[in-house]
Image: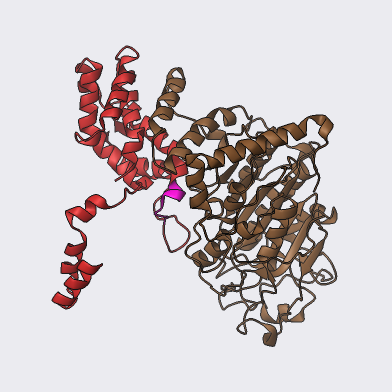
Amino acid sequence: MSTHDDDCGCQEYNELSRRQFVADAAGMSGLAMFSAVFPSWLPKVVLAESYDSTRDVIISIFLRGGADGLSLCVPYGDANYYTGRPTIAIPRPDSTATATRGIALDDFFAFPQAMRALMPAYQAAQLLVVHATGSVDPTRSHFDAQKFIEVGKPRDPSIVTGWLGRHLASMPPVRTDAPLRALGFASGLQKTLIGAPKTLPISDPATFGLAGATTTRTERSTWLKNEYGPAPEPLRSSALDALNTLELLRLINFTGYVPANGAVYPNTSFGRAMRSAAAMIKADVGIEAAQIDVGGWDTHSAQDPLNAGGTMYNNMQTLSNALGAFHADVIQGTQATNVTVVVISEFGRNVRENSARGTDHGRGNCMFVMGRNITGGRVFAFNWPGLARENLQDGQDLKVTLDHRDILAEIVKNRLGNQNLGVVFPDYVPTVRGVTT
Amino acid sequence: MTAVAQVYTKTNGDIPSMIRAILTPANLSAAPLKLKRPYHYLVSSLRATQPTIRSMGALANRQLTLLGQPLFLWDTPDGYPDNMDFWAGTILSRWNFASYVASQSSATGEITFDVTALVALGTPAAIATQIEKMVFAGDMPAGLEAQITGYLSAATVTAARVREAVSLALSANEFQWY
């Protein structure tokens, strides 16, 4: 983790920013915020002695519905994969089925054709696939599993804030004048971000504006700012953040944004969100995090990861095309910006397909991490448990051999500069897995 | 809890009796405010302004999507969240909905909000009082009424200005709760 040189003047700026953060935290609203985000039973937050303005921006992506990790990253080297999936298995890379065979990542795992847009990132060693990972909780409930991952701890109803929200709340802002530090590309704030200061749900930043006559816009904004001054939290902060963000987003040319390296984002809600995120990151306005959701992964029937037009094929293609474009545009772009992208889902799916040519809720899954400072170009499976029936969880699922929080914690510490891991992931001691450089 | 337990014991678990013990005026008055979800906000805004609505389905579907709560489209079986943390950040969409409702003047559009009677009241104070009755049934906090009056007083009282004042009343913090 680097620090600034003194002679660029940044050390003084660093000190000012930290003092401002501490002063804000000591104020009434800051105290109230702290006690809400950090209940007394959590370890004490240790503010960094100096903050690091080269902290990565983090793009956290949640695949809602339980994405099938065995299709996202195919264990073609395990014969039991083919035994259990007679109709939906991705053929081996050396198969003669050239249109549908996997693309070898190593001598055991492969990408399906639908994920080929991520090969440049993988070959550049900037994409890491982690397999047989997930939550240690065995729930197969979508909303329980999503909640446990988003709040960073399973089965603790006292935790109502998100892991990313607590990370942002326990770190000084990269820019003290930033009106917006994070956003959720959604119509409501996702649990992952609950508790984050200066954070809003903004489904489309390009259209974020106050409606009505332009001649009275400023007057009405001032009226609203005064009206919401005494409002109860979190409405007060949300209102003021929204008003302060209006001008910020109007200055960013979302419509005219030209991605670097000829990158083309798919014209889907996910593609547009990644494109907007890229524009905001390059505008260098102080955005530190974004949360983006992608739905449609609950493939109980007609899963079809093989053929163009198939449900999961289309989902994976959209995912990989947008991530691939982001890689070319931002991670390999001409502007020096450090970004880490993480992709996770609430659980994987059964090893064996069902009678409807789909798969049901499972356990172990894969997650993706992408960035310049990630030890990519490999599939990391800790103690790969194998897909033989006797090695499956409950006789049906890939086991979880690596708690996903190990990956997230290492990113939080090494790429986001936050040492307060006990706050971000309460009651969990992460193991370093060497996923960051 | 003690009161309800006593009722439970006395009535052998009669549910209506237990509910009456919970929903007393004192308990209801002491209950914390609840932030309206977009559906409730939309309905309460329309009830307050009483516009002529010619295409409720289209209006509701479009506006609820913009407000963040398209009907029946929440992915997981637990339904749309019912907590402030999820919805507070969508406040801008509510201000924009208020602006939309208050600005609809076409006699043939999907919705018409007629402000003729409001404008005819003439003075900012009289208009603000009438807005208070419409939106808050006479319960608008004095400070908010003064702010509405102030907005109306800051420029010529035109139909457009009156529409903006109504939209601000619907946008106010006090109108977001029930």
Quarter of the rendering containing residue B143? top left
Q: How many marks?
A: 0
Looking at the image, residue A261 lies above or below residue A166: above
| Residue A87 placement (x, y as % from top left) | 66, 75
Chain B visual colour: red
Quarter of the rendering containing residue A273? top right
The brown one among the chains is A
Q: Nearer the viewer, residue A184 or B66?
A: A184
Q: Nearer the viewer, residue A265 or B7?
A: B7
Looking at the image, residue B146 lies above or below residue A355: above
Residue B50 can be seen in this image: no
> For residue B81: magenta?
yes
Its colouring scheme is by chain
| Residue B66 placement (x, y as % from top left) | 44, 41
Residue A285 can be seen in this image: yes
| Residue B131 placement (x, y as % from top left) | 24, 28
| Residue A364 placement (x, y as % from top left) | 65, 72
* Magenta span: B80-87
Q: Nearer the viewer, residue A371 or A397?
A: A371
